Image (spheres, helix red, strand yellow):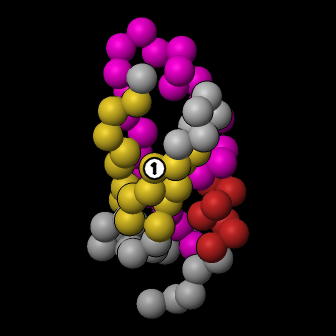
Amino acid sequence: MAPFNSGLCTLIAILLSSLPCQDCLAQCTLGGHVYNKDGSTIGGATVSVISRQDSIVAQVMTDSIGGYIFGFFR
């Protein structure tokens, strides 16, 4: 397994957290995949999302194929 850049994972999480989830009329989910610079998926990476409204941090770990999903947001 190739090493991954944790800074990149943090950047991805920051970019994703800026999505307008708080503007959803109903509950929303957030998910995706984490890739390294060579385009391979990264299993076991920690992805964090920080709520801009109340600074709550949610974290999940990617699965074996680099996928992650956060539960419901309001």
Q: Measuring from the top left, give residue 67's x and y in whole percent.
A: 36, 59
Assess disc 1: are there few (<14), some (14-19) or many (≥20) residues with their C-alpha within 10 Å of its C-alpha: few
Asked if 72 appears above or below 74 in the picture, the reply is: below
* Quadrant housing residue 54: top right
**Horizontal placement of 56 versus 37: left or right?**
left
Q: Quadrant of the N terminus?
A: bottom left
Q: Quadrant of the C terminus?
A: top left
On whether residue 30 falls in the magenta region, the answer is yes
The residue lying at 64 percent from left, 34 percent from top is: 52
**Horizontal placement of 68 versus 38: left or right?**
left
Instruction: Name the residue carrying label 1.
Output: 58
Asked if 48 appears above or below 50 in the picture, the reply is: below
Q: Measuring from the top left, give residue 29's x and y in whole percent.
A: 37, 34
- Answer yes or no: is residue 18 visible: yes
The residue lying at 66 percent from left, 48 percent from top is: 14
- Answer yes or no: is residue 38 visible: no
The residue lying at 58 percent from left, 45 percent from top is: 50
Residue type at mark 1?
A: Ala
Q: Measuring from the top left, give residue 69's x and y in whole percent.
A: 35, 48
Task: Give the magenta-colored segment's residue range.
Answer: 13-38
In what element is the residue under mark 1? strand
Numbered disc total: 1
Tell which of 24 and 55 is nearer to you: 55
Asked if 72 appears above or below 4 in the picture, the reply is: above
On whether residue 11 falls in the magenta region, the answer is no
Q: Measuring from the top left, give residue 19's x and y in whole percent.
A: 60, 31
The residue lying at 66 percent from left, 44 percent from top is: 15
